[in-house]
Amino acid sequence: MYDTTTPQLRAALAAATEDLLVYDLPGIADRHDALVGELPGAAVRFAMKACPVDEVLSCLAGRGAGFDAASPMEIRQALATGTPADRIHYGNTIKSDRQIAEAHRLGIRDFATDSVEDVRAIAEFAPGSRVFCRLATDGGGALWGLSHKFGCSPADALRVMETARAAGLTPAGLSVHVGSQQMTAEAWSAACDRMADVLDALRRRGIALDHINLGGGLPALGYRDRLGTPLEPPLDKIFAVIREGMQRLRAVAGTPLDFVIEPGRHLVADHGAVRAHVSRLTARRQADGERRYWLYLSCGKFNGLYEMDALQYTLVFPEYRGDDFVPAVVAGPTCDSDDAYSHEGSPVQVPRTAASGDPVWILSSGAYATSYTTRGFNGFGPLPHALIRDDRAPLPAAVPGGSR
């Protein structure tokens, strides 16, 4: 399993005396720069939903990244980093007339779409804009497939882009999303094949696109699946397949073709971690007569660990040095039965002596920890966050939960 934590991140977690979420900004910057090196010629548009923390956004903007925004509120937050509007696109295919008009007023001129109805609304409320059409994928190989709500068929894509041209918009590009935490290179190859077919069909209809949006889906490295098995994505192969796909698409286009990619969790998941604590370790018999251990943490599904339905986060018990562990179901603090994981998977090995108040580090939890958290379900509020800004400052003062 990949060890994704830097010494600075571990030092910050060790220094914390209260629960909080720590973001390693130099680590995020390094991951961004490594991605740019792997995919030369592809502009990064960070998927803001993965980590809408102002300081993280400013860090990425400082590295040259733009933003994939899904609402006018996200657009305003992206603009506040100083990023110009032409490096921000409205990547959500679902938007109301009012939202389209507001985005246009804010200077956005690039809109994702996947339906004729949406194109007509963009033409009315954001006249003269550019659109890129999202093609549907099956999501196979990903932890979260994203296969039904978004995207259209190749045949519909032709209709969408021809409608855009007739309505005075610029049919500018195609996009895909192969599913979040995509674990196979084959998904990227199939997506590029599909885009190549549509690109060629559009070219024969006199529509020459200027860019391809490769979407999100690039995996984080520090996850475990629901059974506790480390997830080890073939990242080198994925990058090689994407580079090959870019070459193939350029050849099909026959004209200059730019590329955009929308990483989210790939940039931030492994460079964020939660310092939580043990609420209680219990042992009790279930209705079926089985005796089971339960480890209740101060942080769970509703205040930072929303994705526990599909994965196990790696737990570190920094004050424990022994080898006496017990298999436990890990659960959060709320009075909700969904606030737990490993119901059906493998129990997590936890120290038998774990006591209330003991610190627990929850690694690779930097993606979606702030955006999915509730305002205070059962009175458990969002975690404050702290920032590692450089190697000399392991733990600045915490910032209240959510973005400032």
Image (cartoon, rainbow, N blue to C red):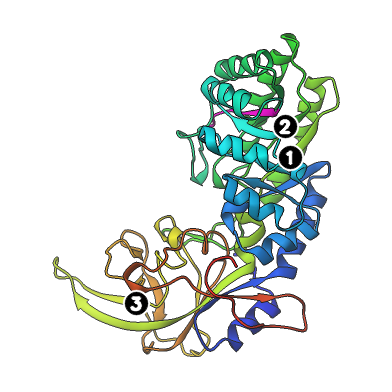
Of the residues under marks 1 and 2, which one precedes in the sequence? 2
What segment carries the magenta color?
129-137
Q: Secondary structure at mark 1?
A: strand
Q: Is residue 380 left or right of residue 29?
A: left
Residue pictured at 76% horizontal, 23% vertical:
209
Which quarter of the rendering shows the N terminus? bottom right
Task: Establish if 287 lies above or below 11.
Answer: above
Count of numbered tags = 3
Assign the C terminus to one quadrant of the image: bottom right
Q: Amino acid at mark 1?
A: Val
Residue 132 included in the magenta stretch of the image: yes
Pair 3/2: label in front: 2
Q: Nearer the viewer, residue 403 or 232?
A: 403
* Residue type at the position of mark 3: Tyr
- Mark 1 — residue? 260
Image spot of residue 52 (x, y percent): 60, 59
Residue on which disc 3 sits: 296
Crowding near the residue tagged with mark 1, few <14, some 14–19, many ≥20 C-alpha atoms within 10 Å: many
